[in-house]
Amino acid sequence: MTAFCAKMEELGLDCSLMWAKIYDIIIKSLLCIEPMTKQHLRRSNVHRNNCYELLGYDIILDSNLT
C-alpha cells in the first residue's frame, strides 16, 4: 500500500483523504449493525470481549480515488 500511495501522490492525488473516506465507510457500517450485534450477544450470554466476527470490505476507487 505504501508504493500505491506514493504513486498516487506523485500523480497529485490525496491518499490521506482516500483513507479517511474508507475509514468513514467502515465505521458507519459497523454502527449500523451494532444494535443487532448487541442483541445477539445478550441472547447467547457471551461477553462482548469474548467474541469476534470477521468482516471484509471491497472498496472500489475511481481515477480520482473517490
Image: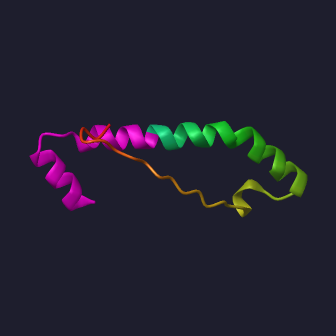
Q: Quadrant of the N terminus?
A: bottom left
| Most common SS among magenta residues | helix
The reply, left or right, for residue 28 in relation to residue 35 is: left
Residue found at x 67% / y 61%: 52
Q: Quadrant of the C terminus?
A: top left
x and y percentages locating residue 40 in the rendered image? 82, 50
Q: Is residue 18 magenta?
A: yes
The reply, left or right, for residue 56 in relation to residue 34 is: left
Residue found at x 37% / y 39%: 20
| Residue at far left of view | 10
In the image, which residues are magenta? 1-23
x and y percentages locating residue 41 in the rendered image? 81, 52
Asked if residue 43 is positioned above or below residue 14 in the image, the reply reads below
x and y percentages locating residue 5 in the rendered image? 22, 52
Q: Is residue 24 magenta?
A: no
Residue found at x 46% / y 37%: 24
Colour mapping used in the image: rainbow
Task: Choose top left, top right, bottom left or bottom right for residue 44.
Answer: bottom right
Which one is nearer the viewer's eye here, 45 or 58? 58
